[in-house]
Image: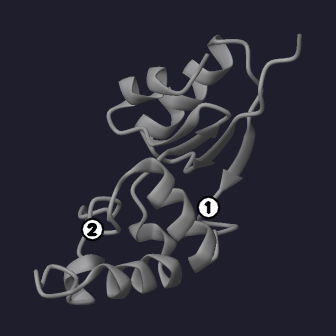
Amino acid sequence: MAKPAVTIYHNPACSTSRKVLAAIRAAGHEPRIVEYLKTPPDRATLADLLARAGVTPRQAMRTKGGLWRELGLDDPAKDGDAILDALAANPALIERPIVVTGRGVRLCRPPERLAEILA
């Protein structure tokens, strides 16, 4: 029986993303790898992924580095739509990795969240 398809929205420069990719492979899957900095998801795809993962755009926003502050995203009054627009326009702001399997979608930070959706 073939293993279900797995997709990882991956940044090879990120140690957490590399750990999750290694864990997927160790479980016997060869995932579809989307290097989201090179091929970012469009706004609709990103909104769908976050909704399926059960996280808000704010929870999926990377707050390391200064870009999020430069864009005023540290303002608690910024709503989810404004943050989602910023994530779609600036994929470096997307927290990673996001993994999709037949069992669901997770923002795998920490990497142990992968176990929730990987058979």
Front-lying residue, 70 or 87:
87
Who's the residue at 46% across and 59% down the image? 50
Question: Under tag 1, what secondary structure?
Answer: loop
Q: Residue 63 appears in which quarter of the rendering? A: bottom left
Q: Tell me how the rendering is colored.
A: one colour
Q: For the view shown, which residue lies furthest in the right direction?
A: 1
- Residue 108 in the image: state x and y as whole percent: 42, 38
Q: Mark 2 or mark 1: name the one nearer the start of the chain.
A: 1
30 shown above or below 106: above
Question: Under tag 2, what secondary structure?
Answer: loop
Count the labels in the image.
2
- Residue 18 in the image: state x and y as whole percent: 53, 34
Amino acid residing under circle 2: Arg
Amino acid residing under circle 1: Tyr
Q: For the view shown, which residue lies furthest in the left direction?
A: 76
Which residue matches tag 2? 58
Who's the residue at 35% across and 68% down the image? 57
